[in-house]
Amino acid sequence: MILSMTGFASATGAGAGASWQWEMRGVNGKGLDLRLRLPDGIEGLEAQVRADLSRAVTRGNVTLNLKLTRDTGTGEGLRVNHAVLRAVLGALATVEQAAMETGVTLRQASAADVVSLRGVLEQGNDEADTAPLRAALLADLPGLIAAFNTMRAAEGAQLAALITGQLDRIAALVAEAQARLPERASTQARALEQGLARIMAQADSVDPARLAQELALLAVKSDVTEELDRLTAHLTAARALLSEGGAGGRKLDFLTQEFLREANTLCSKAGDATLTRIGLDLKTVIDQMREQIQNVE
């Protein structure tokens, strides 16, 4: 089954002195662009996450966010930031001095008041502290990726159905063009005969060899059998890619360019109102199919 590049998944967890929330999003892109927003201070987390995602996703713009909240109730792993503490104490002394000069009496700040201020206490970041947390976080990643791919597969199934319908429409138009060829050939033959009659009536002499050469050149230029055969071959290749599944988006995108090339040539060589209309209809369906293929991984 083909996969869409569009997907979303989220997960929550707790353990190793923290709680967290994962959020993963994907949209279409020409290559693989991983944008990770992970908390600092967890050694080896980003490298492992990037490696796991690179194995699971081959194409698209993927954003992964991790919001982490550390449990501080037990005080485990906490340490005093002495630089911040000195700044806080200096600020408190300044405030107390200014209050005394104006005759205002302030309540004495307690140690609990001081450590509750932002930045005075911080979580330890050494490897021994972060290893259990990293392991707990990474344990959630396979489930998150599986949920992400499940959504991409569901949308991929819808894309496959749409693209299959468009391939069926292209096949019907190719069949219509092939059915039109005998009548077109008859019409062109009559027009050619009339043109030759006018030339012969106005010319004193005509070189038979040159005339045969020009007629052969006209026949080659107006023959669209090769274009229709190539369109049929492209249809077979596109259906095979859809049935194989996997990351076939680039190949399908290349095929749409080839489809469009043959449809353009068909229009330019048509020389027939019905065949021109078929060629224009082909171009419309191919453009619509290309829009859908832009979302295939």
Image (tube, rainbow, N blue to C red):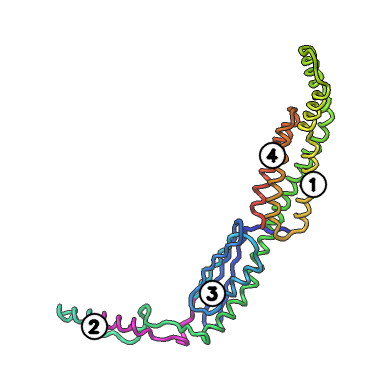
Residue appearing at x 69%, y 43% in the figure:
286
Q: Which residue is mark 2?
A: 93
Q: Earlier in the sequence, mark 3 or mark 2?
A: 3
Residue 38 in view of the camera: yes
Kindly identify which numbered label has been placed on residue 233.
Answer: 1
Q: Is residue 92 magenta?
A: no
Q: Is residue 73 magenta?
A: yes
Amino acid residing under circle 1: Ala
Residue appearing at x 56%, y 70% in the figure:
22
Above/below status of 156 relative to 109: above
Residue appearing at x 81%, y 20% in the figure:
207
Q: Secondary structure at mark 1?
A: helix
Cα–Cα span, label 3 and label 2: 38 Å
Quadrant of residue 102 in the image? bottom left
**Image coords of residue 287 (percent x, y):** 66, 43
| Quadrant of the rendering where the N terminus is positioned | bottom right
Quadrant of residue 142 in the image? bottom right
Amino acid residing under circle 3: Trp
| Proximity of marks 1 and 4: CB atoms separated by less than 8 Å | no
Range covered by the magenta-colored residues: 69-91
Q: Which residue is mark 3?
A: 20
Q: Residues within 10 Å of mark 3 (few under 14, many from 20)?
A: some
| Proximity of marks 3 and 2: CB atoms separated by less than 8 Å | no
Q: Earlier in the sequence, mark 3 or mark 4?
A: 3
Q: Earlier in the sequence, mark 3 or mark 1?
A: 3
Using residue 253 as the reference point, say whether residue 90 is left or right of it. left
Residue 187 in view of the camera: no
Cα–Cα span, label 3 and label 1: 52 Å
Residue appearing at x 30%, y 81% in the figure:
87
Q: Which residue is mark 4?
A: 283
Above/below status of 249 relative to 229: below
Kindly identify which numbered label has been placed on residue 153.
Answer: none
